[in-house]
Amino acid sequence: MSGEVDWNPIRALARRVLREGAPLELTDEVRALLLRTAREVAVTDAAAALRTEAGAYELLRECSRRITDGSNRLMDALHRMYRHQKAGDYDSARQEMRDVLAVEVVPHYRETAQGQLDDMADAP
C-alpha cells in the first residue's frame, strides 16, 4: 500500500463512539469505513467482526488504537532520529527506524520508517 491515507473519518467516528458514548450505527457507509480502515491498519478478519455490534465496536477500537499508537511511536522515533542525525550519530538514527519496523504493523507507518531508513543508506 502506498500513498496517503485519510483517517479523519475513522478518527471522528471513534471520538463520537468511543469517547463520547454515541451509539455505533452500522450503516453501509460505516461498514465500508471500518473495512477500509481495517485493511489500512492490517487488521485481519474485519468482515467477521462486523457480524455483531460488539465485534464492530471492538474493530473500531482496534483500528483507532493502531492509528494512535503507531503515530505516536513513529513521531517519537522520528524526533529521536533527527536528534541523532544532528549529532552525527547515524547508527543510532538508523536504529530508531529499525526499532519501529520491529514492532509496527500499520503499513503506512512501516513505509514511512523504511523510507527514512532508506534515505540514510548513504550516510556515514
Image (cartoon, grey):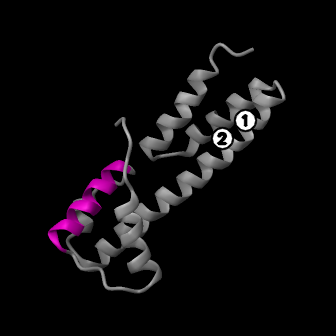
Q: Nearer the viewer, residue 107 or 115?
A: 115
Proximity of marks 1 and 2: CB atoms separated by less than 8 Å: yes
Left or right: 7, with 34 as reference point: right
Q: Residue at x 62, y 17 (%)?
A: 121
Disc 1: CA contacts within 10 A as few (<14), some (14-19) or many (>=20): some
Residue 72 marker: none
List the residue tagged with mark 1: 82
Estimate the x, y position of residue 50 in percent, counting from the top left. 23, 69
Q: Is residue 105 above or below residue 56?
A: above
| Mark 2 residue element | helix
**Residue stretch in magenta:** 27-40
Q: Is residue 41 above or below residue 65?
A: above
Residue 98, image quadrant: top right
Q: Residue at x 45, y 47 (%)?
A: 106
Identify the amino acid type marked 2.
Leu
Residue 22, image quadrant: bottom left
Residue 39 drawn in magenta: yes
